[in-house]
Image (cartoon, helix red, strand yellow):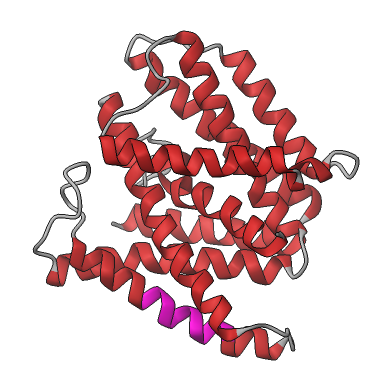
Amino acid sequence: MRNRVITAFLLLFIAIFVIYHGQLPMFLWVLFVGSSCAYELIQMAKKNNIKPYSVVIYTLVTAAIASAYLPMTKAFWLSPFALVIAISILLLSMIELWQKKLFFSQNRVAMTARIAVFVSFTSSYVYLLRDGKEGILHILFCLLIIWSTDVLALLGGRMFGKTPLSPISPNKTREGSLIGLIGSVIISWVYILVVFTYFDIQMNFLLYTGFAIVVSLVAQIGDLHESLVKRRMNVKDSSNILPGHGGIYDRADSTLFVMPLVFYLLNY
C-alpha cells in the first residue's frame, strides 16, 4: 500500500507539472506514455507467441503524437477521417466487450495494426485537448472525473458491491460502478462551480454535467476493456514499472478512451 500511495503522488506531481507547462513538456510526456503503452502491448502479444513489428508501431505512434504537436499537421486531427477512426476505435472496443473477444489479434500483421492504430489514435488526443481552448481546465476536468470514478467505484464496490458488473472483471460490481458515476458527477459540479467561476469561464452547467456523465461512463468502459485485453493475453498487469499500480497502460487505459471523445465534443 505504501508503494502504491507514493507512486500515485509521484504520478500526480508529474501530471500537474506537464499539464501546467503544456507545449514541449506535455508533448514529451504524452510521447512517453504512448510509447510505453505500445511497448507493454507488444510484450503482452509476445507472451502469446505473436511478435508485432515493433519498429512500425513505434514509428507510427511517434509520428501521430508529433503531428498533434507540430502546427503544420495539427489540423489533421479535426478532419472527418480522424474523427471516424477515433469513433470506430471506441465502437469496436464496446463490441469486443459485448462479444468478450479481441478482434485483429490473430497474427503478426493484425496485431501490429491493432496496437499502432489504437495507441496513435488515443494518446495523441491527450496533447490536443491540453493544447485547445481552456485546455488546462478541460483536461483537469476529465482527469478529476476519471480518477474520482475509479476511486469511488473501488470503495463503493467494497462497501456495497453485490452484483458483478461483468465476468471480464469479477471484482467490479454494478453498485460500485453506479457509486463511481454518481460521486464523480457530484465532484464535477464542485469543480464547475468553483474553478470555472473563479476563472470567469462562460459555460453551460447542464452541458458540462452531461460531459461528466459521459466521461465517467467511457472511463469505466476503457478500464473494463483493458481488463479484457489482459485476460485474453493471460497477464495480471500490463507491466510492473509502477510499484503498486502495474504498468503505464494500467493507469492510462481510461484516459486513452476519454480524451478523443471529449476533444470532439468540444470541437464539433
Q: Residue at x 11, y 60 (%)?
A: 163
Residue 187 belongs to the span the image colors magenta: yes
* Residue 235, image x, y percentages: 28, 29
What's the magenta region? 183-192
89 horizontally vs 4: left or right:
right
User: Residue 49 location in percent, x, y?
Assistant: 34, 9
Residue at 70%, 37% in the rendered image: 81
- Please tell me in which quadrant of the rendered image residue 122 appears: top right
The quarter of the displayed image where residue 187 is located = bottom left
Tell me if I can see residue 235 in this picture.
no
Q: Main secondary structure of the magenta part?
A: helix
| Most foreground residue, 143 or 105 | 105
Query: Can residue 99 be seen here?
Result: yes
The C terminus - image quarter: bottom right
Residue 254, horizontal then vertical, whole percent: 45, 51
Q: In the rendered view, does 40 fall on the left or right side of 125?
A: left
The reply to whether the magenta stretch includes residue 246 is: no
Q: Residue 11: image x %, image y %?
A: 52, 55
Instruction: Name the residue at 50% across, 84% down.
Output: 189
- Can you tell which quarter of the image residue 239 is in? top left
Q: Is residue 113 left or right of residue 137?
A: left
Q: Residue furthest right?
A: 72
x 28%, y 57%: residue: 1
